[in-house]
Amino acid sequence: MKRILLQLDTDPIPSSFDRVVAIDAGAEEVLAYGGVTPDNVESLVHGAIFTRGPKELANTAIFIGGSDVQAAEKVFAKVSQTFFGPMRVSVMLDPSGSSTTAAAAVRLASKHIALKENDALVLGGTGPVGQRTAQILASQGTRVRVASRTAQRAESTAALIRGRVEGATVTPCEWSDDGLAAAVDSIEMLFAAGAAGVSFLTADEWQSVETLKVAIDLNAVPPVGLEGIAPTDQAVDHNGIAVYGALGVGGFKMKLHRAAIEKLFTANNLVLDTDAIYALSGNL
C-alpha cells in the first residue's frame, strides 16, 4: 500500500519546497492542495480517513504548511477536530518551515551550552521562526528575551509563550538603539530570526558580549542578521563563540524535516507540532 501525504497549504499555490522534501522523505504520493481553510478542509480530511481501514491509516498522513502561521494553526485545529475514534491519521504542522528551523537551531545550540538556566536573546522573536525558537528554549528552562521593534508585539508574543509553556521565563524587549545594551546584557545565546535582509547587530556589537557562547543567524539573504557570520558557518569558533549561519543550520533542518515526514508513516495517531519536532531532533 502506498504511503500518501496530503499537503494542505494555506497559500493559493502549495509549496514546491515542502512537496520535494516529502517525496525525498519517502512519501510515494503527495496530494497537494492550496487555499486550504478551516471552512474547506473537512472534506479533504474525510477523504484521507474514510478511504482506508483503521489498520491501514498509518500509510496516510497530513502535512500542514503555508506562509501564514496563524492560518495554518487554525487549519490544524480543524483537522484535529475532524478526527474521531480510530479514524485519524498522523499530522505535521510546519508552516514556513518554522518549527523544523527553530528546532534545528536550538538543538545545535545545545551542543555547545546547557539550555537550562541560561539566558538567550531571540531577535525577530515575534516572527514565525523567532516565536518557535523562543518557545522551544523556554520549554527547556532557558530564560528567554523576545525582541521586537515594538514593545506591544514583544509582550504579546512573550505572553503567548508563557501561556503555552508552564513556568516559562520570557521577557519582552523593545529592539532599539537605546535598548541594545540591556537586551544583550549577560546573554549566553543569541538567535537572529528576523525577516530576509534585516540586519540587527554589527560584528563588534555581538562579539563584545563577554558572556556569549553561541550565536546563530537564520537569515541567508544579504545583509545577514548578525554581521560577520557567513551563511555557511557551522560551529565556527569566533573568539570562543560558536557561530552558525543559515546554511549551517539548514543542513540539519532538512535532515529533521525528512525524519519528521518519515515518522508520520509509523503510526496513524502522531501529532508533530513544535514540541514534538524538537524532541525528534534529539534522535538525529
Image: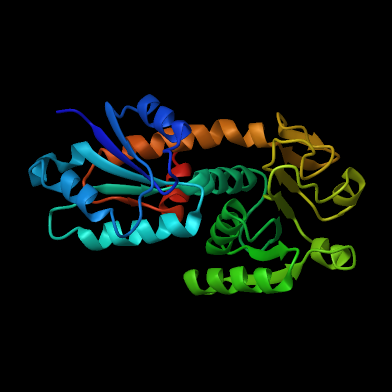
Which residue is painted at 11% across and 47% down in the image? 50
**Residue 201 pos. (x, y %):** 84, 50
Please indicate, yes or no, whether residue 166 appears anywhere in the rendered image: no
The reply, left or right, for residue 80 in relation to residue 103 is left
In the image, residue 142 above or below residue 111: below
Which residue is painted at 27% across and 26% down in the image? 28
Which residue is painted at 12% across and 39% down in the image? 56
**Residue 276 pos. (x, y %):** 41, 52
In the image, residue 215 above or below residue 5: below
Which residue is painted at 25% across and 63% down in the image? 81
The reply, left or right, for residue 1 in relation to residue 107 is left
What quarter of the picture does the N terminus occupy? top left
- Which residue is nearer to you in this view: 20 or 171? 20
The reply, left or right, for residue 97 in relation to residue 249 is left
Q: Which picture quadrant has residue 235?
A: top right
**Residue 284 pos. (x, y %):** 46, 36
In the image, residue 124 above or below residue 53: below
